[in-house]
Amino acid sequence: MTTQFSLTDDQLAIQEMAQKFTADNITLHAAEWDEKHHFPRDVIKQAGGLGFGAIYIAEERGGIGLGRLEAALIMEAMAYGCPATSAFISIHNMASWMIDHFGGDRVRDHYLPDLVTMDRIASYALTEPGSGSDAAALKTTARLDGDHYIVNGSKQFISGAGFNDIYVTMVRTSDDGAKGVSCLLIERDMPGVSFGAPEKKLGWNASPTAQLILEDVRVPVANRVGGEGEGFRIAMAGLDGGRLNIGACSLGGAQRCLDETINYTRDRSQFGQRIADFQNTQFMLADMATDLEAARALLYLAAAKVTAGAPDKTKFAAMAKRLATDSGSKIVNDALQLFGGYGYLKDYPIERFWRDLRVHSILEGTNQVMRMIIGRDLLRQ
């Protein structure tokens, strides 16, 4: 059946390719990665070989030149196996897109070839110890000194910190609030760059997180992305896509837990009948599936709007992120309840998804900030 609400044949092919890659390379290993806090660099590099490191980089620069819906399909498929690994690849795509979309020819020519193949991986560095949701209050400074900036400060909760090669970093070049923020590309091996200890997290154990510490780091002016003072706008533009992708990671994790729960309730019996035969179970499964499809439909619509540059794209990205991440966590929580005591054990995947998806309503803008964005937009009309 083909309707305006169906995926195209090309989109279905991309989805199928991502699902096969996940089944072959991620799903069977994800529990071990979580348990051992292993960062699967080799698998991420393999994903780069399929073009998944350059989903919306133009084809003439080595990318696969797709839209935000195709990216969401890929992230959703990979999160079915491991949300942490999928989200890690999403962050690399967001950082690479910023370089491609806002960077000049020199920056693009120098950095994109290795980022496209994921021979080098990029991190996104906006958050600081003292500025989370209030991102424009960032304090990391970049002082002009000839043809270099001298950068001092620290960034908090940076995925890939210490492992990744390039840090798309938001810095303060003047005291003019959001208008005083600029975007610099900082390399891991530049003198003065160091990293904090790996954070001990509830979930996302397959994805390393640490502080990025910058002490008198000399960064060439040529490494600036966009003009001086354009950094905050660049940061926010990247987040529309990042929010879609993190929502898609919640969809994928929730779908996995729904599928696991359907199979489990068919197999396990209590009080002389299968758990699946109790009306309560069927009602819970029905609500889980309905909430998942509603969140998916909104997210796909928002992705189409971001690709098209629709005037309401930011509002819809915020709506989709809020709904998909909240619904995803609730669906996984209900899955754990239906699994009972076994759901609480690491022998089954539910508890890992419960832990991994919890952070999705915090990062890429908390769900409270999503409501602020939506509410302000509604009252501006």
Image (cartoon, grey):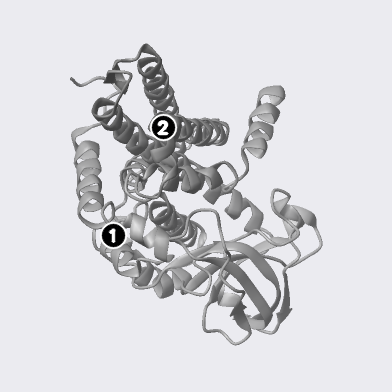
Using the image as rendered, state which of residue 59 and residue 215 is in the foreground.
Answer: 215
Q: Is residue 7 left or right of residue 130?
A: left
* Camera-nearest residue between 214 and 183: 214
Q: Residue furthest bottom?
A: 191
Q: Quick one: 79 or 16, which is closer to the camera? A: 79
How would you rate the neighbour count of disc 1 (Cα within 10 Å): few for under 14, some for 14-19, many for 20 or more? many
| Quadrant of the rendered image containing residue 351 | top left
Instruction: Indicate whether 283 appears above or below 204.
Output: above
- Quarter occupied by residue 14: top left
**N-term-proximal mark, 2 vs 1:** 1
Circles 2 and 1: CB atoms closer than 8 Å: no
Picture quarter containing residue 125?
bottom right
What residue appears at the point 63 percent right and 42 percent down from the top-left corner?
366
Q: Is residue 251 left or right of residue 65?
A: right
Instruction: Give the residue drawn at x 52%, y 75%.
Output: 162
Q: Can residue 58 be spotted in the picture?
A: yes
Q: Which residue of the protein is positioned furthest toward the front in this rendering? A: 271
Residue 257 position, x and y percent, is 36, 36
Q: Which residue is mark 2?
A: 335
- Spot the residue most to the right: 175
Quick one: quadrant of the N terminus? Answer: top left
Residue ID for mark 1: 47
